[in-house]
Amino acid sequence: MYLDDESTAAAAATEWDVIVVGAGAVGLVLSVILARANKRVLLLESGTTNNGDAKDLNEVRVTGRAHQGAIHGRARVVGGTTTLWGGQLTKFIPYDFSSRKIMPDCAWPIDSREIEGYYAEVAGLLGLDISRLDDASVLAAIGDVPGQDQPGCEIFFTRWLREPNLARQFANDLTNLATLSVAPNCHASEIICRSDTAEIRGVRAVCAGGNKIDFDSRDVVLACGTIEIARLMLLTAKKAPALAWAQNPNIGRYFQDHLDLIIGSIELKNKKAFGNIFENVILDGYKYQPKIRMQAPVLGELGCLNIACTVRFDSSIADDVHMLKQFFKAFVTGARIDKPWQALRRMFALSHVWFPLVWRYIRHRRVLAMADRGVSAIAHCEQRPLWDSRVTLDPVSVDRFGDPIAQLHWMVDESLQIKSLQAFAFQLQGFLKTMCGADLVVKPEILAGDAVALSEAQDSYHQCGGARMSSSGADGVVDANCRVFGTENLYVAGAAVFPSSSFANPTFTAMALACRLGRYLMAPRGR
């Protein structure tokens, strides 16, 4: 249930089983799992149900490489960034968890098999079709893709949620679950500890009217996003430097994001064959998007970062088609329709394209792709985690509560990045040629290995690291159970714990780890 100002103040008299800081994707999944298991959960959110109410708290000073997502890819609202995204989910592959020659210090202290089952549990929570979580089941439904068994690259599918906004997905739990209390407009400003400094007492938050309230809990989980997790831990360490974990030099370090850039254009020889491979698939109302990645053995042999490719169909009417899709989606779901008459006028103006769109969907369960402006190949690139890529406290600027804002210094290993892009482009050229006779025209600067190619790359709003998982406090911030080294009951949930970040949207893996953490917190422990 949602707490108002009065009941939020009263919540300070309760000792909660778990306090979760942050009501984004990870915080919501963890809170719902725990509350459904009869754990008394207090979910603190610095925003409200309106994303504009606390935007100023996302202020961050960016140094180093430019990073758009530090501002535009974060949300202070119940639902977090799921109020901004499209709901695309991708699993990491076993290779991502392993020790690699190109970054031997970034192996995960857990095996991929330890979270594989949690992907299915999260998928069930979010309403995905769990019978098609593996790509083989999708290929079986649409027919084998020719040339898929050739070495080098492979086709895989991302899955799209029917309801991307998890505040809506879990609306019934947030409103009616008696064991879950949601406290909006409560900005966590400090982690508070007991006198022995190893046991966390709870969280101090600034709530409505500027009142500082201390909430007590058996366990505390930080799930407030990569940048804010680092800031909150560093802020607490500044206020209480004697804490056992406060001087851990790894806090805020190894910040990562994915680099997105156009690597070239694709010249089609057989449009039908190309569409049969790369047009989006609709099965039983669920959307699956085909993409390309290098096979794990090839990655290891070439010593490359993990990279995937999205095929983008560029059309002069893309915006119109998107608007009309949103119109129909709103019409079906009963949501508010912006400018309905404008949408209807565009529908009539584009009546000549509706028959092929509808026929393609009914006959083949595909979303017809129009590409009168060409086809582009967009790479999504993993980066090697770097010690000096980090989140710190800004020495000058403070937020409205007088606390330092975050400072982000993002760094990229440019030589390894461009080497990996070159290798991927070469493999992709051969793959497309064999698959459907298409030619990939790679940008000259990538072929030449010129790092200037990276000047066009942008972050993908996939912030990771800063509280990375490790076998010891000498190398990381949390252990294999996401518990902060030097504490008994402080945990971190989310992509902040990732030792490495693959190429993929991290949300699915972050939620799977949160589900795993939830099961750990439910188990009996000797305290």
Image: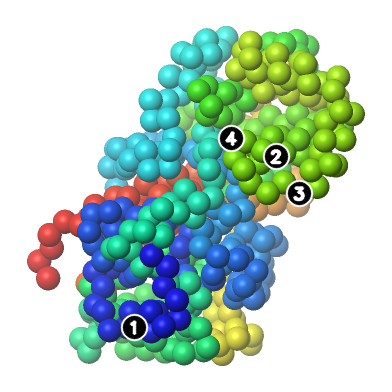
Could you tell me how far apart the alpha carbons at marks 2 and 3 are, in whole angstroms?
A: 9 Å
Looking at the picture, which amino acid does disc 4 mark?
Ala
Left or right of 517: which side holds 106? right
Q: Are marks 4 and 1 in contact (CB under 8 Å)?
A: no
Residue hosting label 1: 10
Quarter placement of the N terminus: bottom left
| Total number of numbered discs in the rendering | 4
Q: What's the residue at 51%, 89% (across, down)? A: 210
Seen as rendered, the residue at the extreme right is 349
Q: Residues within 10 Å of mark 1 (few under 14, many from 20)?
A: few
Seen as rendered, the residue at the extreme left is 526
Q: Residues within 10 Å of mark 2 (few under 14, many from 20)?
A: some
**Comparing marks 2 and 3, which lies closer to the viewer?**
3
Mark 2 residue element: helix
Mark 3 residue element: loop
First in residue order: circle 2 vs circle 1: 1
Q: Where does the image place residue 222, in percent across and percent down from the top left?
A: 39, 67
The picture quadrant where one finds residue 179 is bottom left
Q: What's the residue at 87%, 35% (across, down)? A: 345
Q: Are marks 2 and 4 in contact (CB under 8 Å)?
A: no
Q: What's the residue at 30%, 66% (across, down)? A: 41
Q: Where does the image place residue 155, in percent across and percent down from the top left?
A: 55, 23
Looking at the picture, which amino acid does disc 2 mark?
Gln
Residue hosting label 2: 326
